[in-house]
Image (cartoon, grey):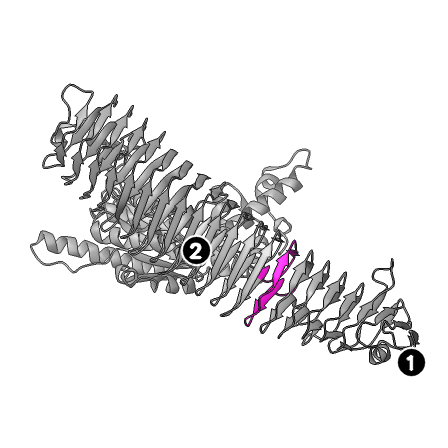
């Protein structure tokens, strides 16, 4: 499109000025125009860098949007330094170091302007500029969509950022824009970003979606107010606040977020009113660090798509929920770490798959006039220093109403637990707690179940229609005053060994203590269910080890260990001191080098020497040990350890428990739990961790206790081509096949040429190669009408698969 002319209409009254004029360039027209003039630009492409310094109107022709293109080869296409009107222009920038449209001063109006560029920013407002920007569109995959900087401001109405290589709208340096009914999507950074002291952002009726960063990001003492806004379909968190940020969300909707819906850290403050958080992959509210605070009123958090608590409060943060609803989530509220606190008033927590309220690591929770329904556990005060108050709360339709364990000391007043499947209140493991005026009705278990000598205080508590009894206490148990039950005997105190049903519920004590409600599934295995004692001697098992292909260094290591253990046993029998032998091992090497097979034989050897009871192998990986929420990892690890009692716990790819970008990953909890179990039950289980050599070195460094538990590392070298050939020969012999005279040589060449990348499976590769040969052999021989025995058994070079 060629460059056209510019018509200038003069609005003054002087008869000495021409009322109209035609100019060949925009620069000439701007030079001739004065305040109030209207510059109507003819359709065309203008390769000029324009600077508007007077209060003129610069516009394209009517009814022809997009027909005027301002597209210089470099620099800023359009700079506005006055209270001008710019309308119906198409701006194209090519300079990655400069904005496409720069507003530096005045209060201009930008209307129906479209910016298509690959610039540092599409529209940039700075300094004292206060523009009004209406119905403008920015498409800038090279940088920021709209940037408001250095004290700039203005109002943006019905504007749209359709793409941005960085933030959609970025505010910093003390700027204060207002956004009304704007849309930001397909940004590579945050949708809305505000950072820096004295920086502020106000957004009303806006929508942020399909962005790769956070939907809204407020940091570095900035403040923001969002009203009636939608944030959804982000790749990262929905809303993030960091470093003294302050944000108010009113009547907003945060939804369909794969990570945290809202994440706060470092003394940030959020006020959340009449807003909804739903369909989030991690936490709905994630609140961290001392001084960080959330005040939520009349809000709803629901429909989690992940396995994390809906509200997470840790590291000394505070959350206040008033008249809120949390439902359809794995866990509703987790408060952990000393100094962390949650105050929940007149709120509903319902349809919770696990625990509605969990308080641990010295945290505090206060619930007043709340309703908990349809949860596995209503409230769980987990450990020493954890406490708070439950007052005038109702708990209905749960497995267990309230659990207090491991020295926790809450105050529970005038609370009612209705229809729990197990206990209404369960106190164990040295917990304390004070229960005043509480009531349990229609329990499937006991109403109040206090064991392990816990010095809990019960005053004016009552039970009705409890399936196993109203009160069940161990000797030297709680302090009871004015408690009643519809049972004729009232509260009773019994020794634990006189109540076999209670013993069944508590005999399997893990790191977190016994948890009611698992009576039918968490019982210890019967002795008869354990693997039988091995019948082979250690020499017989070592003979099987020697028969394995390759692994010469591994065989030497295992035989040396066996000799040490055997001699130690004989020295003890002779009344002599035996050298301490670390039996836990690290196996390093590539997949398919026989690590699992050697672990199984090692367990059988230790059993034959009387070191282990059965020597059976329990093989696990990260997925078997790491849970999806706080507490479940320790339980899973304990269960795996218990299954391996008397034998070998083999953890394959153990380095996956400590990923390099672990963050809040629960794998570290599995490692810590495992180290403690290995110390507490050092004679019961042998633990072998296995994985790639480099990754296992990192694994051994994550916990000071890990390396000390595993003092011996056995390296499994890759098989040589000759050893892979021997494995194929063994497979052929086992399945009644034979290799033709030339097949062995072809296999050697095949294994030599085979790529040895990270996915190379060594012994597994040899077996897969044999299976592929058998399949190709079958396809060949199936065409014979009457195949001979040789036809049915001989494998030829042409049966080898193609090299990948």
Give whichever of 585, 496 is nearer the camera.
Answer: 496
Instruction: Give the residue drawn at x 12%, y 56%.
Output: 571
User: Residue 651, position in %: x, y?
Assistant: 37, 51
Does 598 appear in magenta?
A: no
Look at mark 2 in the image and give the residue it sits on.
593
Which marked residue is nearer to the observer: mark 2 or mark 1?
Answer: 1
Q: Which residue is mark 1?
A: 16
Q: Position of residue 700 (x, y in %)?
A: 34, 62
* Residue 497 quadrant: top left
Q: Is residue 167 left or right of residue 696?
A: right
Q: Is residue 761 visible?
A: no
Q: Quadrant of the C terminus?
A: bottom right
Upstream in the sequence, badge 2 or badge 1? 1
- As for residue 187 lying within the magenta part, the answer is yes
Residues shaded magenta: 165-192
Q: What residue sits 36% from the left and 29% below the top?
A: 397
Instruction: Look at the picture and state if 168 lies above or below 676.
Output: below
Tag 1, which secondary structure? loop
Residue 484 is drawn in which quadrant?
top left
Q: Is 44 situated above or below 787?
A: below
| Nearer the observer, 191 or 198 | 198
Q: Indicate the secondary structure of the residue bearing disc 2.
A: loop
Label 2 and label 1: CA atoms lie apart by: 98 Å
* Image point (38%, 51%), residue name: 319
Q: Quadrant of residue 366?
A: top left
Residue 724 lies left or right of residue 73; in this view the side is left
On the rendered structure, is 744 left or right of 423?
Answer: right
The label on residue 603 is none
């Amino acid at each position: 499109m060629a460059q056209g002319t510019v018509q200038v209409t003069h609005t003054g009254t002087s008869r000495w000025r021409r009322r109209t004029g035609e100019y060949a360039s925009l620069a000439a027209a701007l030079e001739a125009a004065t305040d109030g003039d209207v510059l109507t630009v003819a359709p065309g492409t203008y390769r000029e860098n324009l600077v508007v310094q007077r209060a003129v109107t610069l516009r394209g022709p009517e009814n022809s949007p997009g027909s005027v293109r301002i597209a210089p080869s470099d620099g800023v296409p359009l700079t506005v330094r006055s209270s001008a009107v710019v309308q119906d222009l198409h701006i194209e920038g090519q300079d990655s170091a400069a904005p496409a449209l720069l507003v530096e001063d005045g209060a201009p109006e930008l209307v129906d302007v479209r910016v298509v560029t690959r610039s540092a920013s599409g529209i940039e407002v700075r300094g004292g500029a206060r523009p009004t920007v209406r119905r403008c569109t920015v498409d800038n995959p090279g940088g920021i969509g709209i940037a408001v900087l250095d004290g700039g401001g203005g109002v943006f109405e019905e504007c749209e950022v359709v793409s941005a290589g960085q933030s959609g709208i970025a505010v910093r340096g003390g700027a204060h824009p207002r956004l009304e009914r704007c849309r930001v999507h397909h940004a590579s950074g945050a949708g809305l970003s505000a950072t820096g002291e004295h920086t502020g952002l106000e957004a009303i009726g806006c929508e942020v979606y399909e962005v790769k960063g956070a939907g809204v990001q407020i940091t570095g003492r900035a403040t923001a107010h969002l009203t009636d806004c939608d944030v959804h379909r982000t790749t990262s968190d929905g809303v993030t606040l960091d470093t003294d940020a302050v944000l108010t969300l009113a009547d907003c909707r945060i939804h369909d977020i794969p990570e945290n819906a809202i994440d706060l850290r470092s003394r940030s403050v959020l006020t959340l009113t009449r807003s909804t958080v739903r369909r989030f992959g991690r936490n709905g509210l994630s609140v961290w660090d001392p001084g960080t605070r959330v005040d939520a009123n009349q809000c709803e958090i629901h429909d989690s798509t992940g396995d994390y608590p809906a509200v997470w409060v840790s590291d000394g943060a505070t959350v206040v929920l008033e008249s809120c609803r949390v439902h359809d989530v794995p866990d509703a509220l987790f408060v952990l770490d000393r100094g962390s606190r949650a105050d929940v008033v007149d709120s509903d927590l319902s349809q919770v798959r696990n625990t509605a309220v969990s308080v641990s690591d010295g945290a505090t929770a206060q619930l007043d006039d709340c309703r908990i329904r349809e949860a596995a556990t209503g409230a769980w005060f987990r450990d020493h220093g954890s406490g708070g108050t439950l007052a005038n709360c109702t708990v209905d339709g749960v497995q267990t109403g309230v659990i207090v364990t491991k020295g926790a000391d809450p105050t529970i007043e005038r609370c009612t637990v209705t229809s729990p499947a197990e206990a209404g209140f369960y106190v164990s493991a040295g917990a304390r707690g004070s229960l005043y005026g509480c009531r349990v009705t229609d329990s499937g278990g006991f109403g109040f179940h206090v064991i392990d000598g816990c010095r809990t205080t019960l005053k004016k508590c009552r039970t009705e229609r409890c399936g196993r009894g109203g009160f069940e206490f161990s000797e030297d148990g709680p302090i009871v005053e004015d408690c009643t039950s519809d049972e004729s005997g009232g509260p009773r105190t019994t020794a634990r060994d006189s109540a076999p049903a209670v013993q069944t519920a508590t005999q399997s004590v893990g790191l977190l203590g016994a948890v009611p409600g698992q009576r039918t599934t968490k019982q210890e295995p019967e002795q008869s269910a354990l693997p039988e004692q091995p019948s082979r001697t250690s020499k017989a098992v070592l003979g099987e080890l020697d028969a394995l292909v390759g692994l010469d260094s591994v065989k030497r290591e295992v035989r040396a260990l066996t000799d040490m253990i055997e001699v130690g046993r004989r020295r003890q029998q002779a009344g002599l001191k035996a050298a301490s032998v670390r039996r836990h091992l690290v196996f390093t090497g590539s997949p398919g080098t026989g690590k699992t097979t050697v672990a199984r034989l090692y367990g059988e050897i230790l059993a034959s020497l009387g070191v282990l009871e059965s020597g059976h192998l329990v093989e696990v990986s990260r997925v078997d040990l790491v849970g999806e929420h706080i507490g479940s990892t320790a339980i899973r690890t304990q269960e795996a350890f218990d299954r391996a009692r008397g034998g070998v716990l083999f953890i394959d790819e153990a380095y996956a428990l400590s990923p390099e970008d672990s963050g809040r990953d629960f794998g570290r909890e599995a490692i810590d739990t495992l180290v403690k179990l290995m110390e507490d039950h050092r004679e019961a289980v042998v633990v072998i961790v296995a994985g790639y050599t480099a990754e296992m070195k990192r694994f051994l460094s994550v916990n000071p206790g890990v390396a000390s538990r595993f003092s011996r590392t056995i390296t499994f070298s890759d098989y040589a081509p000759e050893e892979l050939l021997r494995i194929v020969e063994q497979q052929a012999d086992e399945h009644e096949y034979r290799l033709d005279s030339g097949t062995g040589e072809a296999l050697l060449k095949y294994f030599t040429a085979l790529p040895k990348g990270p996915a190379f499976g060594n012994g597994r590769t040899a077996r897969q190669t044999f299976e592929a040969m058998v399949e190709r052999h079958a396809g060949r021989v199936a065409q014979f009408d009457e195949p001979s025995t040789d036809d049915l058994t001989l494998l030829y070079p042409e049966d080898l698969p193609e090299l990948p």
